[in-house]
Image (spheres, rainbow, N blue to C red):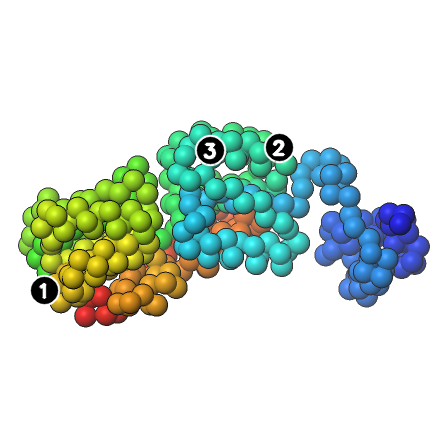
Amino acid sequence: MALVSIKDVAAHAGVSPGTVSNVLNRPGKVAPATRERVEAAISELGFVRHGSASTLRAGHSRTIGLSVIDIGNPFFTEVAAGVEDVASELGYAVILGNSAGSQDKEDRNLRVLAEHRVRGVLITPSGEDPGRLDRLRERGISVVLVDHPAHRPDQCAVAVDDVAGGRAAVTHLLAKGARSVAYVTGPLTIRQCVERREGAKAAMRTAGLDPDDLKVAEAGTMTARAGEKVAAELIAGGLPEAVFCANDLLALGVLRALLRAGVRVPEDVALIGYDDIDFAAASTVSLSSMRQPTYQLGRIATELLLDECDNPDTHAHQHIMFQPELVARESTQ
């Protein structure tokens, strides 16, 4: 079957090839009635645009990149859903990269995105080196930080106040009567883990407790299996009255280990997680958690990115900071 060309679509719709090109690349410049006629011709003829050719002509593609640090975490799955929905609405495709917390892997992913001439990149960086992102911007690739604050005015970012989240989580545990608290965290090279610890210590300080009494148990990964391992170590070393976990996956692992060991939650140990993933409410003992507007993070970050891509002269960089929300369930009641 012969490939359908732009000229074929133009002839079928009764317009010029230039009009078909505008419908494909700049639909806002085409009158609605004409655009509908061209789109009908595209559908009837089964026309598929030559993506590589259009990329070479324009110098970029109608794709954006999304780089996250752990696609296995439902938090990032929900972020990606928000990204994909906006991108699809605006005629863009998304290339996903998972750094797994490795800067080397992240660098490789960013090189691949640059080679594909993406319009822009949404990234939750695995480190604090801004130079890598500056190199993307020097290539004309817009960059927006997701779940990470910006420290410069010429950079868009959408994030959640993790210090406030850590403070709220531990304040809740202390209000339930706990006086000894453990913080189960992922690697402290991850900004979110560090800031949630800072918030936890601030809550203890406000309550008149020594913040250095916060027992910090660091896991190598932020998974349920890692949470189980850390919980076993806490059980062997003497359990605190409450445990705050840096994400829900860790908390679900801790919960599983505690229940297996005959520890009652919350009667013996109160437990709270972070992110409020779907599994939190569905666990054997429903898990208290700090909820983040995860899907909205993805949506708003993508809107900012594509506005910067499509309207560089009028785009205003924004730093958007959401506040997390405490969701109290059985594990702290």
Residue depicted at x 62% and y 56%: 88
**Callout in the foreground (3, 1):** 3
Q: Position of 14 compared to 225: left or right?
A: right
| Kind of residue indicated by mark 1 | Gly
Q: Amino acid at mark 2?
A: Glu
> Is residue 305 shown above or below 291?
above
Q: CA distance from mark 3 to mark 2?
A: 15 Å
**Helix or strand or loop: what does disc 3 sit on?**
helix
Residue 29 x, y percent position in the rendering: 76, 55
The CA span between labels 1 and 2 is 55 Å
- Helix, strand, or loop for circle 2? helix
Mark 3–mark 1 Cα distance, whole angstroms, equals 44 Å
Question: Is disc 1 placed on a helix, strand or loop?
Answer: loop
Q: Residue at x 31, y 56 (%)?
A: 248
Q: Is residue 263 left or right of residue 18?
A: left
Tell me if I can see residue 195 in this picture: no
Q: Position of residue 198 (x, y in %)?
A: 21, 46
Name the mark on residue 105: 3
Residue sitting at x 62%, y 32%? 115
Q: Residue beneath label 1, please?
A: 177
Residue 19 in picture, x, y percent from top left: 84, 52
Of residues 285 and 83, the one drawn nearer to the viewer in this rendering: 285
Q: Residues within 10 Å of mark 1 (few under 14, many from 20)?
A: few
Q: Position of residue 294 (x, y in %)?
A: 42, 58
Judge depth for marks 3 and 2 and give the one in front: 3
- Residue at 27% from the left image edge and 50% from the top image edge: 227
- Compared with residue 248, is residue 149 higher up or lower down, i.e. above or below? above
Q: Which residue is mark 2?
A: 115
- Looking at the image, which is closer to me, 278 or 131? 278
Give the total of numbered labels: 3
Task: Specify which label sits upstream in the sequence, 3 or 1.
Answer: 3
Q: Amino acid at mark 3?
A: Lys
